[in-house]
Amino acid sequence: MEFDINTGRAVVTVLSLVAFIGIMVWAYSSRNSTDFEEAAQLPFDQD
């Protein structure tokens, strides 16, 4: 297999897609919802 610019572009595209899907899974996982809801209320906290 010859590695040229188009192969490099394809590899970068696939890695970017995998990273995007990983971030989406992390952001919408139910484990993180309580942390995100707590962070969303920070601007409204009165100290």
Image (tube, helix red, strand yellow):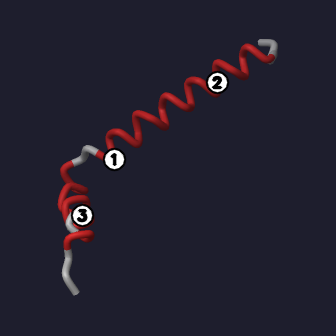
Nearest the viewer among 8 and 45 is 45
Location of the N terminus by quadrant is top right
**Residue, disc 2:** 11
* Residue 23 location (% of width, % of height): 40, 42
- Report crowding for label 1: few under 14, some 14 to 19, many 20 or more residues within 10 A (C-alpha): few
Q: Quick one: SS at disc 3? A: helix
Nearest the viewer among 2 and 9 is 9
* Mark linked to residue 35: 3
- At 32% across and 40% down in the image, what residue appears? 25
Spatial distance from mark 2 to mark 3, Cα to Cα?
Answer: 34 Å
Spatial distance from mark 1 to mark 2, Cα to Cα?
Answer: 23 Å
* Residue 10 location (% of width, % of height): 64, 18
Between discs 1 and 2, the one toward the N terminus: 2
- Most extreme residue toward the bottom, as rendered? 47
Between discs 1 and 3, the one toward the N terminus: 1
43 with respect to 1 (left or right): left
Q: Quick one: SS at disc 1? A: helix
**Circle 1/circle 2 CB separation < 8 Å:** no
Nearest the viewer among 44 and 26 is 44
- At 18% across and 61% down in the image, what residue appears? 34
Q: Quick one: SS at disc 2? A: helix
- Report crowding for label 2: few under 14, some 14 to 19, many 20 or more residues within 10 A (C-alpha): few
Q: Amino acid at mark 1?
A: Trp
**Residue, disc 1:** 26
- Report crowding for label 3: few under 14, some 14 to 19, many 20 or more residues within 10 A (C-alpha): few
Q: Nearer the viewer, mark 2 or mark 3?
A: 3
